[in-house]
Structure formats: structure tokens, C-alpha cells
Image (tube, helix red, strand yellow):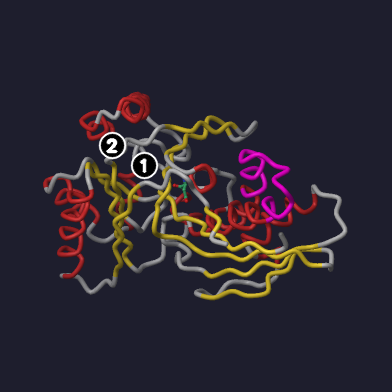
Amino acid sequence: MNEIKIFTPATVANVSCGFDVMGFCLDNVGDEMVIRKIDKKGVFITKIEGFDLPFEAELNVAGVSALAMYKSLNIDFGFEIEIYKNIKPGSGIGSSAASAVGSVFGMNELLGRPFTKTQLTEFAIKGEALASKCEHADNLAPALFGGFTLVKSVAPLQILELPTPKDLYATIIHPQIEIKTSESRAILPKQVPLGDAITQWANLGSLVHALHTSNYNLIKDALNDVVVEPHRSQLIPLFNEVKAACISAGALGAGISGSGPSIFTLSKGEKQAEKVKKVMQDIYAKSDIDFDIHVSKINTQGVKILG
Ligand code: HSE
């Protein structure tokens, strides 16, 4: 096999109470990429459609993760990468992670899978760091492994795969404003009051337990963020209104997707997720902010081969 076409998914990081450690994978939102073996040594980005991103491999998230892998190999050929980008950079649904994961996943397949998914995450983290100025894997892990993941530690990298309750659906609204991850990290306080830390780790532990036991009521109770959301929500127009309306319309919870501006909700059942979509839509339609909305089941496979 000399060429592979892949779907590399969007993801929701943090999931309210799991800042920098929890994430889940979306099913129908993502980028496509083509990775090709070539005779010339090196990594070359030959096509980018969708958004204006750099072609120089060292300046491109997909290129940086590909180079991290390439440098660990001793091979006499190279790779070309084509990127068909659907996930807007700065949207909060793992745009950079999708790119970083796609290149290393595709190369690994063409090489006969010498690397584990955790090793691929190690390479991809280099690309992610180019975009967010810090090494975190909470979007990368669900994009590679699928479902819900928890990053136990970054050094050494330890990723736990968590179960996905089968009726869980996400609704995501993406207001068309850009929030740079690096900026929305910069506004966060460096210290957390002990009381807030206790609430947060009780919620995160409860969320993990709820996923294991498909306990939707406990998911609802656990989806609360007292550490990050109070700061970042100020950057997202209509956040509080959308959150309150979605929860009163039956969503299990709502929060900031990654570093925003996207807002995610989780619902039990597709019908409920569609109802929440309508609620979000009605609120944003009254503003002058453009938006798009997705309803997605949780993608338990992660990045996929298309051909
Ligand atoms: N956990 C990261 C953050 C995700 O919230 O800054 C960014 O994509």
C-alpha cells in the first residue's frame, strides 16, 4: 500500500470537569487526509483545502507530528500529505489534534503499523504543541483511540480508554468567532482554591464511574466545571443562556468544548440531542453571530481509513 485516505475526527476535550485530561470523539465532524509514500526522503505537504494553513512541514501541525515520527525512523523514502480541512482552526473541537493525528496515523498504516496508538500520540503531541503552545493530549487521545479517554499522565504518556454508554449523543454549537487555545489558557488562574479542587475531582471521578456504569443521572450530576468554565465562559457570547436552556430542555449537561468557542452538550438519545440542537439554534439565531451545529453519536473507533 502506497497511499491511504483517512477521516480524522473532531473531538471534545475537558468534558467540563476533566480539564486537560478527559475527551471524547465525534462521529460525523472531521477532516480528510491523504498520505502517500514517495521516493524522495522527507515530509511534504502538497495540498491544503478548506483553510489557509502553512505548507512548510515545520510550521504545520500535521507536518510537525509527521516529522516527529519521521525522525524516529531510518527509511530511504518520504511522505506526501494532503489535508482536506473541515474543522475550523480555533473552533474548540480539536482542529489541530485532527491534523496532528491524521498524518501519524496514515504514515503508521503505510509502514505496517510499527507504532502503538500511545506512541502515535507521543508524536502527535508535538504537532498539538505547535498550535496551543503546550503539550496536552486530551483531544489527541480520543481522536486516535475513539470513545472517551482519560490522559492519566503526559510524561510518561498514559492513556486510559473509558467505556461509552450506548445512548449518549453530543450536540455541539460552533459560534463563528475564533478563540486561540493559547489565549484562553493564558487567562486561567495558576492556583485553584482547595474547595474547588475537591468539587472538581469528585465530579471527574463520578463521571468516570458513570461512564463505566452507564449511569446517565450521574453523568448529569458530574458535568460541572468550577475551575475553568467560570473564567473562559466570559469569552463566549450567550454561553450561560445556552447552557441553562439546554439543561432545562433535558440535556445531561453543557460546557465549553476544549478551549471554546464551541459549546458541547451530552444527551441521552438522539431525539433528545436533536431537541437540544433546536434550543441552541433558536438562541444563537437571535444574535448576529454565525454558527453551525452538529449532532453526533460518540465515535468509538476514532480516526478511520476511508480507502
Ligand atoms: N485542554 C485544552 C484546553 C484543550 O482546554 O486548553 C484545548 O484544545
Q: For mark 2, give the secondary structure.
A: loop
Find the magenta span and give its range.
Answer: 107-124
The quarter of the rendered structure image containing the N terminus is bottom right
Query: Alpha-carbon neighbours of circle 2 within 10 Å: few (<14), some, or many (≥20)?
Result: many
Identify the residue at the far left of this view: 248
When the figure is inspected, residue 283 is found, relative to residue 218, above or below; the finding is: below
Q: Residue shown at 14%/44% (left/top)?
A: 250
Image quarter (top left, top right, bottom left or bottom right) of the C terminus:
bottom right
Residue that carries the numbered disc 2 in the rendered image: 223
**Image location of residue 231, percent across then percent down:** 34, 47
215 magenta-colored: no
The foreground one among 104 and 285 is 104
The residue shown at (34%, 69%) is: 176
Residue 263 location (% of width, % of height): 31, 54
Q: Residue 8, image x and y in percent?
A: 52, 57
- Position in image of residue 227 (x %, y %): 35, 37
Please give the residue where the numbered disc 1 appears in the rendered image: 15
Picture quadrant of residue 148: top left
Label 2 residue near ligand 1, CB within 8 Å: no
Report the number of discs: 2
- Mark 1–mark 2 CB contact (< 8 Å): yes
Instruction: Identify the amino acid type marked 2.
Output: Leu
Q: Nearer the viewer, residue 125 or 35?
A: 35
Name the mark on residue 295: none
Q: Is residue 230 left or right of residue 121?
A: left
Q: Which residue is painted at 51% across and 31% down in the image?
A: 160
Residue 216's quadrant in the figure? top left
